[in-house]
Amino acid sequence: MEIYYADESGFDEDYSRSHGYAMRGERVFGEVYGTHFGRTSIVAALDKNNKLAAPFSFKGYMNGDLFEGWLEQVFVPCLTNPQKSLLVVDNATHHRKEAIYEIAEVHKFYVVFLPKYSPDLNPIEHIWACIKNWLRLHFRKFDSFADGLLHAFERR
């Protein structure tokens, strides 16, 4: 059985440091500009080899239509043997169970929904956390957000 763990994550297109370092007893001062930055979201599945399968990025936030479109148009074509494939997803509100079960039935793969509030059971969450942490530390080295994000995925 091929198991895939799917999830999406949003990346703010500007990473400001949330904390700073100073000598004990000294305050840290800094500025975070009040402008609103864009957001890039990515949905993908993690396979048994810890590789991202069917990555898809877009501007904005995830919704049910986008997730179901990704499932049918991007994820399903990457399956080599759908009858022996299991997709594990969380209970996010945009993961509409009935629609996802229907897509799975049509394309003959299995789906399991994780219990609510259990990100520790989905290993792709660790991938997103590592990429975001790396971006926070290295974002300023790149000319654009897209370059930094691409580099973060390549080094993973």
Image (cartoon, rainbow, N blue to C red):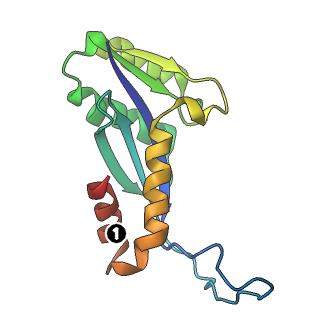
Q: Is residue 18 left or right of residue 13?
A: right
98 or 48, which is in the foreground? 48
Asked whether residue 60 appears in the rendered view, the answer is: no
Q: Which residue is mark 1?
A: 148
Q: Amino acid at mark 1?
A: Gly
Q: Is residue 28 left or right of residue 122?
A: right
Residue most extreme to the front: 24
Position of the N terminus, as image quadrant, is top left
In the displayed structure, 32 sits above or below 70; it is below
Residue 60's x, y, as percent? 47, 58
Local crowd at mark 1 within 10 Å, few (<14), some, or many (≥20)? many
Count all numbered tags in the image, as a single digit. Answer: 1
In the displayed structure, 149 sits above or below 81; it is below
41 or 141, which is in the foreground? 141
Residue 67's x, y, as percent? 43, 37
Q: Residue at x 29, y 70 (%)?
A: 147
Q: Residue at x 49, y 74 (%)?
A: 14
Q: Is residue 139 left or right of residue 81?
A: right
In the displayed structure, 74 sits above or below 111; it is below
Asked whether residue 156 appears in the rendered view, the answer is: yes
Q: Residue at x 27, y 27 (%)?
A: 76
58 or 140, which is in the foreground? 140
Residue most extreme to the left: 80
Residue 29 in which image quadrant: bottom right
Q: Residue at x 67, y 33 (%)?
A: 117
Residue 100's x, y, as percent? 45, 23
Residue 87's x, y, as percent? 40, 22
93 or 22, which is in the foreground? 22
Residue 59 in which image quadrant: bottom left
| Secondary structure found at label 1 | helix
